[in-house]
Image: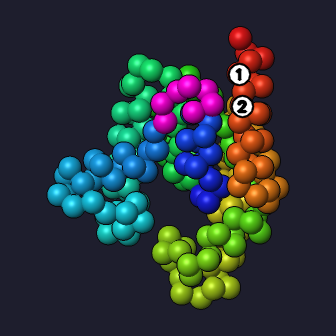
Amino acid sequence: MKHTGKSRHGVALAAQLDRGFCDTDTIIQEIDSAQHGNRRTVRDIYLEEGVDRFRQLETAACRLVAAREEPLVIATGGGVCDNAEALESTDGGLLVHIVDTYDAIATRVFARGIPAFLQTKDERVGRERFRELFDRRVARYDAIAHLRVELDGRPLGSARSLIIATVTEYLNGRK
């Protein structure tokens, strides 16, 4: 889910596991920049190009990182669970679902106003739509993830430690 710290925690996890790190949002921006000549934010790409084009770029990004030979920690966009083709390309990897409370995530999401992807200017409607999105995505990720890490509103350092410990323990148990 967006604003769970996937990228921040992913960098720390990769360092702990002595692996490379990739963020598919960054790769989406690089692909888009190569095609359009200017670097846009993921939000701008989504708004200007639409969901279908964004999903195409997301799929391309996931395929690129999946094709790399070395073991990686990959942070995907929060909506990759809605993109079957992108998810398919990550088969074989460990899918970790980082879950924080609705209140913690909603606070972060709405800190800069109503996000454009909620397609409303009415905060009440935006919060209702975000709640529906949150519930749907949490259920979807629960259905497909190998491992779930509950952050429960923890501060950044504590959340990072929990993720690293949980993933490390899981990987050590699989060996």
Please state which amino acid type lies under the numbered disc 2.
Val
Crowding near pointer 2: few (<14 within 10 Å), some, many (20+)? some
Residue hosting label 2: 167
In magenta segment, residue 136: no
User: Residue 132: in sight, yes or no?
Assistant: no
Please tell me which residue lies in front, 3 or 141.
3
Which residue sits furthest top? 175
Secondary element at tag 1: helix
Q: Magenta segment range?
A: 15-21
State which quarter of the image contains the N terminus.
bottom right
The answer to whether mark 2 and mark 1 are in CB contact below 8 A is yes
State which quarter of the image contains the C terminus.
top right
User: Residue 77: in sight, yes or no?
Assistant: yes
Q: Position of residue 50 (x, y in %)?
A: 36, 64
In the depicted structure, whether residue 17 falls above or below residue 101: above
Left or right relative to 112: residue 58: left
Residue hosting label 1: 171
Please tell me which residue lies in front, 78 or 153.
153
How many numbered marks have been drawn onto this rendered protein structure? 2
Q: Residue at x 49, y 36 (%)?
A: 21
